[in-house]
Image: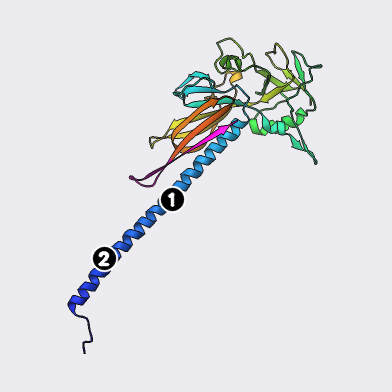
Amino acid sequence: MRRSFTLIEIIFVLIILGIVASIGSDLLFKAYENYLISLEFSKASYKTDVALEQMARRLEYRIPYTGVSIHDISDPDTMAPLSQVNPDHKIIAWIGQAYEARRGEYNGSTNYPGWSGFADLSESNKTQLKTRGDDLNIATRIIEPIYDTNLSQANNGCALTFAAYPENVDILTAYGWKKPTGTDPTDIFAVHAQDSTTLIYDAIKPKKVYEHFVIGCSAYAIVPKSNTQGNYDLYLYYNFRPWKGERFSDGKSVLLVQNVTKFNFRRVAHSIELRLCTNSTISSDINVTICGKKVIY
C-alpha cells in the first residue's frame, strides 16, 4: 500500500494552489478597490451636499434684487446684476438680511422680534423710521456678536432698504456695488437704533418711505480660488458692506469646500440655481467627481 504522494502529485497540488491564490488575491484587490471608490464617492457626495446646503441657507435670507455676478477674483470691478446671464462670471454676491435679529429672542412663550420689517408711516419721515412692535435692543444684542457691529451706534455698518423698491433699479449703483466716485447708493441707507422702536438715518436720507423694510448688516460672496491640484477651493466672504464702498476682499472668509471642478449659478425668475461639482482623488489613475444642484427660492 502507498503511504505518500508522488512528486508529480505534489507539483500538481502546488500549481492548483497557486492558481487559486492568484484568483483570490485578485478578487480581494478588486473588492478593496471598490470599497475605496465607494468610500470616496460617499465623501465627495457628502461634501458637495453640505457645501450646497451652506450656500443655500445664506441665499435663502438674501435681500431681493441685491444680487450681482462678478467676473473673477482678479477682476472684481467687472460685474452685472444676477438678472443678466453672464456665464463667464465666477463669483456671486448679495446683501443678506440680518434674519437672526428678525427672529428675535424667546421670552418664555414666543419669539419676540428684534425687527419686524413693518414701519409706522404716521410717525416715520425722511429723518427717522418708526417701527411697529419691534425691540431694537434685542436686535442690537443679537447683531453685535454675529456681525461685529453695534446697531445702537451711528455708522455701525447696518443699513435698511425698502421692499417696495422695484426690480428694475440699477442694482450696481442702487446698493453701492459699483457706484461712481463721489456718489452715494440710492436705495440702501445706513441706520442706527436711537431707542427700542426708532431707526435714525446716518447720512443718506430716502426720498420716500415705504411700509415694509429690511435690515442688512453684511453682504456675502461665494468666491472660487485656484488650488495646487488644478481645481478650485470655494470660499464664503462675509462682513463687508458695499453701501460703504467695501468689496468682498475687505471682509472675512471661510472655506466652504475644496477641489471644486465646476461652480455655476444663474437666476431664474425670482429663484437662484446653483450647480457644484467636487473631485476626490483615490490614486493617479482613479478620480471621483460628484455634481449637485440646488434651487433657492
Q: Nearer the viewer, residue 93 or 269?
A: 269
Q: Is residue 97 above or below residue 110?
A: above
Q: Is residue 158 above or below residue 10?
A: above
**What colour scheme has been applied to the protein in the rendered image?**
rainbow
Where residue 57 sits in the image (x, y, percent)?
60, 35
Residue at the front extreme? 269
Q: Nearer the viewer, residue 153 or 113?
A: 113
Tell me the crowding category of disc 1: few under 14, some 14 to 19, or many 20 or more residues within 10 angstroms, Cα based. few
Residue that appears at 41% across and 49% down: 37
Which amino acid lies under the numbered mark 2 shown in the image of this protein?
A: Ile
Task: Report, in whole angstroms, how far the alpha carbon at label 2 lies from the one at label 1.
Answer: 29 Å
In the rendered structure, the answer to whether residue 192 lies left or right of residue 61 reads right
Of callouts 2 and 1, the N-terminal one: 2
Whether residue 154 can be seen here: no
Give residue 87's quadrant in the image: top left
In the rendered structure, the answer to whether residue 102 lies left or right of residue 35 reads right
Circle 1 is placed at which residue position?
38
Give residue 17's quadrant in the image: bottom left
Q: Which numbered marker is on residue 19?
A: 2
